[in-house]
Amino acid sequence: MPEIVIALVVLVATGWAIARNYDAKVVLFTAGIILLYAAVLLGHPVLAAKASTGLSWCDPFKVVKDLFVKQYSNAGLIILTLFGFAAYMSNIGANQKVIELLSKPLARIRSPYVLVPFVYWIGTLLSIIIPSASSLAVILMATLYPVLRAARMSPLTAAGVIATTATIVPTPLGGDNVVAARVLGFDNVVDYVFIHHAPISIPALVVIGIAHYFWQKRMDLKAGAAAEFEIDRSKLSTQALEAPLWYAVFPVLPLILTIFFWAAFEKAKVGLVEIAVFSFALAFICEIARKSRDPRTTAKKLMSEANLFFKGMGEGFSKVVILIVAASTMVAGLAALGIIDRISSAISNVENAESGLIFAFSGITALITFISGSGNAVFYSFIELIPQIAERAGIDPIMVALPMQCTSHLFRAISPVAAVVIIVSAVIRENPLNVVKRTAVPMIAGEIAVMVAAWIRYM
């Protein structure tokens, strides 16, 4: 059938391009448009009759427009708001205060290997408020590294742990969790995170921390004196911001309020957008009150700083929302060609289809993430497919989507071309492959833990 041949060629070309680090958004949009026009040329409708423009050759672009509207009214607006909030928190020094507060207890631990799992777990907590893995790594190398060196931790051990901090944290503020909850049909992201994500990810996080302890110790013993060297401080472009310690409450305020409304006011429709905007407004008011006594601070400057909230929203749009729409466009193209229906029909007649789907989606995600260094593009590409395929096959979509989601984060930390690995390697002046040697075993241990936990929970 020509539909299958076209779909295979486009999918292979898409996977190759993403693996070769072509811009994932452009690649996915291109693939989606090609598939949609292929469907039109083969006589397949890409939109329902009521939604059509009346001109079949215009319908593919109407599909893209509808996907943008859909994302803005759902997960997209939440992601934009959370990115804007995180940008403002970084500017006023609130994120830095959280890091300082959580780092203080670590200074009391003198054993470098006892310190290892705690650094990993605290870094994981910090990824709740700093959504970018590479940004978090730079900040941790600048602020936490002196503490780790004081405890006689080797640079490669510190780098290996820090490069893996932003992985599978169960937080309702995570963009991937927001998208997964929406696609899988949850009204509240907290339900998805606490009922499904946390029971899988928390045991895996414990396993990863313990694996780090034994693996880093073994690698240091193997390296001997070669494990000791200095870092390149010129790569650490962070500046100390004068903010009171109590500002540390602001970055975690959206998380606290989200859980509070979820637990205390179950019927209240207070979403993440309202909570993030309220938290931003409260922080802005406190900034005005704190800086109004400083004659060097003007109203214009305060307003300019507040504008970083909206610039952060723009970053969320360019980094995440566009990627989601691009991936959805490709999925729409596959659906228009009838490929999803064919896959679903084939799977529904296969015994143990659950196991096959789990390993197939997670395996492809692991491979592309490892090669490309980006897990988000793969996850957002596949997540839209899963509910349709799982429903036709009579399978719970969560049991396929959740392991795939975790895999996309875990395997990013073992890719030598991942941004976070490259940044950490540059700071310690080491080959990225040497950092990957430190991250690979703990991440693979986490992947095994995720698959086992998902198997026990859903099979």
Image (tube, helix red, strand yellow):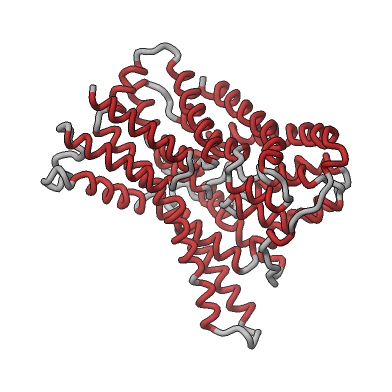
In which image quadrant can residue 287 be found?
Answer: bottom right
**Is residue 311 shown above or below 35?**
below
- Give whichever of 413, 426 is nearer the camera: 426
Q: Is residue 28 visible?
A: yes
> In the rendering, at what x and y percent does residue 18 appear?
45, 40
Could you tell whether 398 is left or right of 440 in the image?
left
Report the quarter where the N terminus lies. Answer: top left
Left or right: where does residue 288 sit relative to residue 387? Answer: right
Q: Position of residue 433 (x, y in %)?
A: 67, 39
Coordinates of residue 241 in the picture (x, y in percent): 68, 70
Residue placed most toward the observer, 354 or 219: 219
**Residue at the (65%, 32%) spot, across then down:** 203
Pick the front one: 32 or 357: 32
Q: Residue furthest left?
A: 54
Question: From where the camera sits, is residue 271 visible?
Answer: no
Q: Please tell me whether residue 52 is drawn above or below residue 146 in the rendered image.
A: above
Name the side, left or right, on which 35 lies relative to 279: left
Residue at 51%, 19% in the rendered image: 459
Total number of numbered discs in the rendering: 0
- At 34% across and 52% down in the image, what residue appears? 73
Residue ranking furthest to the top: 351
Judge whether 345 appears above or below 46 on screen: above
- Can you name the residue that lies furthest to the bottom here? 295
Towards the viewer: 434 or 267: 434
